[in-house]
Each structure stands twice: as C-alpha cells, then as structure tokens.
Image (tube, rainbow, N blue to C red):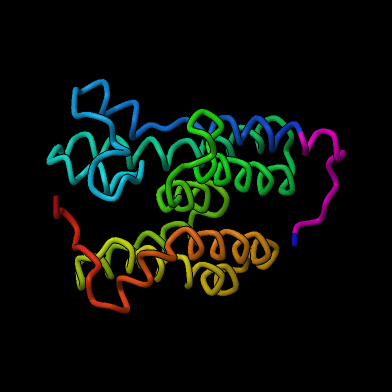
Amino acid sequence: MPEFITAPATLILVGLLAYLLGSVPFGIVITRALGLGDLRKIGSGNIGATNVLRTGNKGAALATLLLDAGKGGLAVLLARWAIGAGDAAQVAALGSFLGHLFPVWLGFRGGKGVATFLGTLLALAWPVGLACCATWAVMAALFRISSLAALTAAATSTIWMWLFGYGQMVFLGLILTALVYWRHSENIARLRAGTEPKIGRK
C-alpha cells in the first residue's frame, strides 16, 4: 500500500474528480457522433473498444481505446501534478477506473475497464503499464480473444509491479484485477464453454 500523506478531504476530492472523468462514456459518444447507433444495443452491449469494433468501424474502435485509456492516465497525471504525492495518484487511478465501470451518466452501468486499467498503469508506472500492454498484445495475437488477453494482463499486473520495484502499488493492483475479473464473469463462463467470440467478430 502507498504511504498516505495527503489530507483525507483532498484524497476524497481527487477520487471524486477522477471518477467523473472516468465516467465519460467515449464509446457511446463516438458511435453516436458517427451515426453507428446505440452501442449498448450492439454486440455485447459493452461500451468499450472491443464492442465498438463490432460496428465494423476500426477508426472508432481505436479512438475509443485511446480515449478510455487516456482518461485513466490523465486522472493520474493531473493528481500527481496537483498534489505531488503517490497516494493521490493511486486514488485517482481507482476513481477513474470506478468511473468507467459505474458511470453516473449511464445509471452506473459501464464498461469492463480494460483500456482504462492499462491507461492508469501506464501513468502510474510506465514499465508496469508497458508490460501489461505487451502481455495483452501477445495473448490477443495468439488467441484472438480480447477477454482472455485482458484477464491475463490483469492477472500478471501485480507480478510486474513486484518485478519492477513498485511494491507500493500491489494493493491497488489487486483491487483493479479483482474488479476486472468480476466485470468479466460472463466472459469467463463463455471461455470455459468455448463460446467466447474472437476479436473483430460482429
């Protein structure tokens, strides 16, 4: 766990602002702007980049991926810049991640958080973030299943934290990983059944 040196009221404010930033549903905003329909009624109904890809618009999917990752990273960087403490940065990471999973604008029904998860890790500790991104990319290339790649990247995140000397992030990593697995419970069931769709399938 990080050493908590920031005033609790400040951490609460950081967490709230990060949550609001994380709550911005870029997938829905982009698909509506491009006339692709309501993302929640397409494919899996998820608001993330993988489901945007099922519309057939690769540009929209890439934009969603970058913006969902960017909002998590931006929350961390702003907290670090404004407060200058590791505890605030980690609270911002958790807040933005929860915002994506439970956005107030969508009745607290959001995405699965993979891009935001990776974005926060890149901003918190870029070696860890890059290692998780590489893990995702390798698994996606080998099996062409986004959820499997995401689950593997999340599962190895705390290992990378230890290996790269970011032990103070492990507790946060465990929380984020648990949330990723919880949000992917249906995907895990389909993986076990062998019915999980592959990347790019409409």
Q: Residue at x 48, y 42 (%)?
A: 109
Magenta residues span: 2-12
Image: 51 above or below 81: below
Task: Name the residue nearer the viewer: 142 or 23.
Answer: 23
User: Percent from the top left, x then y, of residue 37?
Assistant: 22, 29
Task: Name the residue nearer the viewer: 14 or 192.
Answer: 192
Image: 80 above or below 160: above
**On the rendered structure, is 78 left or right of 101?**
right
Q: Residue at x 72, y 42 (%)?
A: 88
Task: Name the residue nearer the viewer: 26 or 11.
Answer: 26
User: Percent from the top left, x then y, of residue 74?
Assistant: 52, 35
* Residue 104 covered by magenta stretch: no
Q: Residue at x 22, y 71 (%)?
A: 195
Q: Residue at x 75, y 31 (%)?
A: 13
User: Percent from the top left, x then y, of residue 115?
Assistant: 40, 48
Image: 156 above or below 38: below
**On the rendered structure, is 106 left or right of 63?**
right
* Residue 6 covered by magenta stretch: yes
Total numbered labels placed on residues in the image: 0
User: Percent from the top left, x then y, of residue 132?
Assistant: 42, 63
Task: Name the residue nearer the viewer: 80 or 32.
Answer: 32
Image: 43 above or below 187: above
Q: Name the image quarter holding the N terminus.
A: bottom right
| Residue 95 placement: quadrant | top right
